[in-house]
Image: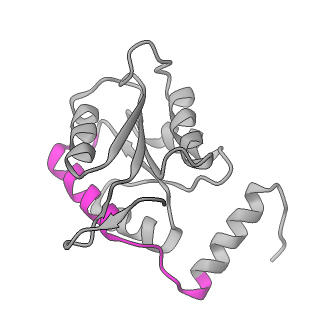
Amino acid sequence: MGGEGVTSSGSLRDMRISVSSDMDEPVARFLVEQLRSRGHEVVTHGALRPGDDSRWAPCSEAAARDVADGTADQAVVCCWTGTGASIAANKVPGVRAALCTDAYTADGARRWNDANVLALSLRLTSQPLLQEILDAWFAAEAGQDAEDRENLAHVGRLDLGRTVSG
């Protein structure tokens, strides 16, 4: 992730983050505000960008493709439940999207799964909960546990369409 720094609180700074939402909801707007207030550059897709395709599958794909092609360091994809956004994002090779409904899951998604796309439910995520999830997401780093790294390598082979027995 080029250009990022780490603040004294341990959170990543100065990243380019792609954000998509299929609805222009207050929590989606708050998400964009929060990311900018944390020092990140935000690129929007879907209902957050006038004239863009706001259906959950295309806008989630667009944000995920920004990560896969390196024009964004990470992405946050949102839809009513978060499930569709997560599914669409995960269809893009190289993306590891995690639907997170709490801070513990966000921490684990980064630490154990090296997730690079955060999926959120517009229905379930309040503003205080969003702040907790973002704090955990940005504070955690990918772990170096051998089993976790082996699992990530396996996922990488799946991205390439290779089946692996085991």
**Residue at point 21% right, 37% down?**
30
Q: Say left or right for 151 vs 121.
A: right
Q: Residue 128: within the magenta?
A: yes
On screen, residue 118 versus residue 65, left or right, reads left
Q: Main secondary structure of the magenta part?
A: helix
Whole-percent x and y of residue 46?
44, 24
Identify the residue shown where x is 46% and y is 51%: 74
Which image quarter: residue 122? top left
Q: Nearer the viewer, residue 79 or 42?
A: 42
Quarter holding the C terminus? bottom right
User: Can you say whether 83 is above or below 108 in the image?
Assistant: above
Residue at image coords 58%, 79% = 148
Farthest residue, direction top: 51
Nearest the camera: 151 or 31? 31
Counting every numbered tag in the picture gives 0
160 relative to 121 in the view: left or right = right
- The answer to whether residue 83 is magenta is no
Q: Residue 127: where, in percent of width, then height?
A: 17, 44
Q: Residue furthest bottom?
A: 146
In-front residue for pair 67/120: 67
Instruction: Give above or below for 128 relative to 149.
Output: above
Visible residue check, residue 77: no
Residue segment shown in magenta: 124-147
